[in-house]
Image (spheres, rainbow, N blue to C red):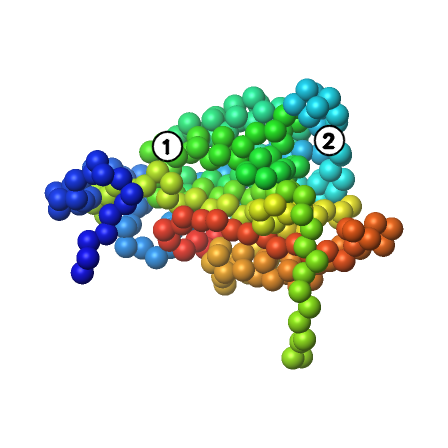
Amino acid sequence: MEETSPDIKAFNFKSTNTGNRVMIPAEEGEGVKFDRDALYYDMSGDKYLLIFNHETFQKTVYFKNKQPKTRVGTDKDVKKLSRVFDDLGFRVDVHDNLVYDKIIEKVQQLAKRGHRNTSCICIAILTHGDKGGEVQAADKPYLLSDIQGIFESQIDLVNKPKLFFVQACRGGNVDAGNTVQLDSEGFLTVPSHADFLTLFSTVEDHLSYRDAHGSWMIQALCSVLAKYNESLDLLQMITVVNKKVAYDRVTYCPSTPEMDNKKQMPETRYTLTKMLKFR
């Protein structure tokens, strides 16, 4: 079989260089156990949910001295997320309308906390957004990677799921959809980017929708988690969320024809190495 290699020349592909030689010690004693061969993450430890909720924004130079629109209905998302994740055993911490520096400060505080007994970190970001992973703090836009990168070097969180739920637009395109006819223990080196999952409310370049009752994706996520958390794993539940948003939701804006009867499709990016069941 022909040998494969990445598009670099500096690495020496001898067997001694391609083995798993740089090691991270397995956890011992108290704390969440690491089992390389387990199919599911150990969710018996502490679980945290940080919610960064943005309803109102500031008028700053970063927003071209214009105040972004108020996000009516986001309070409904916060209430439902808080209730569902509290029922799932998460410690829920809600932060409203924070500026960028405060968001980073809160994330760093969580990341640097001792996590030997932690099973899962989850962050929900409810805000405006744009292309390329841009989301908005109260005072300016920033990149989702600004937050995710903070967790990549935390040894206590290696092999533990870091989940991100992002309710935000990812561009300005609308989706008219397509019409179909219905027929009724040891040592292991783990990549720093492993064990992440990001659920976006919409695909890149497209709008995401919300009304006075909350956003389509967050409301669907919460109802699915509440109903199926004992029987399905996370990726299976996200598939059900995709179905609910894709099939059950459509915009109703008869006074604005270009926004009327439009669809939305959530999208997930993940590097999970095990299946995840909350119970």
Q: Residue furthest bottom?
A: 183
Determine whether, in the image, residue 131 is placed left or right of residue 43: right
Residue 252, above or below 151:
below
Identify residue for label 1: 154
Q: Amino acid at mark 2?
A: Pro
Q: Residue furthest top?
A: 61
Q: Amino acid at mark 1?
A: Gln
Q: Nearer the viewer, residue 263 or 249?
A: 263
Q: Nearer the viewer, residue 255 or 266?
A: 255
Q: Residue at the location (31% across, 45% down)?
A: 33
Whole-angstrom CA distance, mark 2 to mark 1, is: 34 Å
Q: Residue at the location (74% across, 42% down)?
A: 73
Question: How many residues crowd mark 2 within 10 Å: few (<14), some (14–19), many (20+)?
Answer: some
Q: Residue at the location (18% across, 60% down)?
A: 1
Determine whether, in the image, residue 107 is placed left or right of residue 206: left
- Residue 118 visible in image: yes
Question: How many residues crowd mark 1 within 10 Å: few (<14), some (14–19), many (20+)?
Answer: some
> Which label is found at residue 24?
none
Determine whether, in the image, residue 126 is placed left or right of residue 162: right
Identify residue for label 2: 68
- Residue 116 visible in image: no
